[in-house]
Amino acid sequence: MPLNLSHKEIVLRGIGEEDLPKLCEIYSSTREAEMQRLTDWTQSQKTAFLMQQFSYQHTYYQQNYNGAGFYMIRYKKEDIGRLYIDTNFKGKEIRIIDIALLPKWRAQGIGTRILEDIKAKGKTLHRPVSIHVESFNPAMNLYKRLGFRKVSETNGVYHLLEWRAA
């Protein structure tokens, strides 16, 4: 079930093998603060670790979310992020598997617009929208501002957030 975005310059494009380097860059950007704390690792060790972790995550998502959409987020014809989403998760909800923007595109309203469009889809389909978010993720404030509420927690780190139409 395709997701239509309301902003004409934000486009979702299905990913392909040729997108893996950019997708790895996007993934790695979400872990920059964590990598900066590893002062005893060389840059090449950090890069190898991030490439490995991206590969594991990417493979897991591809194998475990059958029917999901895996998209590159494009803004003004530039690849700026990724959106992995299942609009029919377990036949009863929309699950945002992952959404991430490159650092220079964060805090500009792009993520908010995409999330608002996802919420609109949820409202149309009469389905809640859910996402797992690490408790220390800076985007947690965005989700709360957009009406997502914590419904469960795993290992004290991963919060399952959910939005429901009023």
Image (cartoon, rainbow, N blue to C red):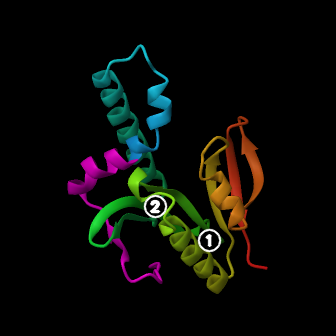
Image quarter (top left, top right, bottom left or bottom right) of the C terminus: bottom right
Q: Is residue 53 left or right of residue 45?
A: right
Q: Residue at x 35, y 40 (%)?
A: 55
- Give the distance between the C-alpha atoms of the residues marked 2 and 1, in whole angstroms: 17 Å
Q: Is residue 131 left or right of residue 70?
A: right
Q: Is residue 17 magenta?
A: yes
Q: Is residue 115 left or right of residue 153?
A: left
Q: Residue at x 61, y 65 (%)?
A: 90
Q: Quadrant of residue 149?
A: bottom right
Instruction: Find numbered disc 1 in the image and state the secondary structure of the residue it sits on.
Output: loop
Q: Residue at x 74, y 72 (%)?
A: 164
User: Which mark is nearer the camera, 2 or 1?
Assistant: 2
User: What is the magenta range?
Assistant: 1-26
At label 2, which amino acid type do we have? Answer: Tyr
Question: Considering depth in this image, is 82 or 122 the residue closer to the camera?
Answer: 82
Sooner in the amino-acid sequence: mark 2 or mark 1: 2
Q: Label 2 crowding class (10 Å Cα cut-off): few <14, some 14-19, many 20+?
A: many
From where the camera sits, is residue 102 visible? no
Q: Is residue 59 magenta?
A: no
From where the camera sits, is residue 74 visible? yes
Question: Considering depth in this image, is 74 or 69 the residue closer to the camera?
Answer: 74
Mark 1, residue position: 91
The outermost residue toward the top is 40
Instruction: Find numbered disc 2 in the image and state the secondary structure of the residue it sits on.
Output: strand
Q: Position of residue 50 (x, y in %)?
A: 37, 34
Q: Position of residue 89 (x, y in %)?
A: 58, 66
Q: Is residue 120 above or below residue 94?
A: below
Mark 2, residue position: 84
Q: Is residue 115 above or below residue 157?
A: below
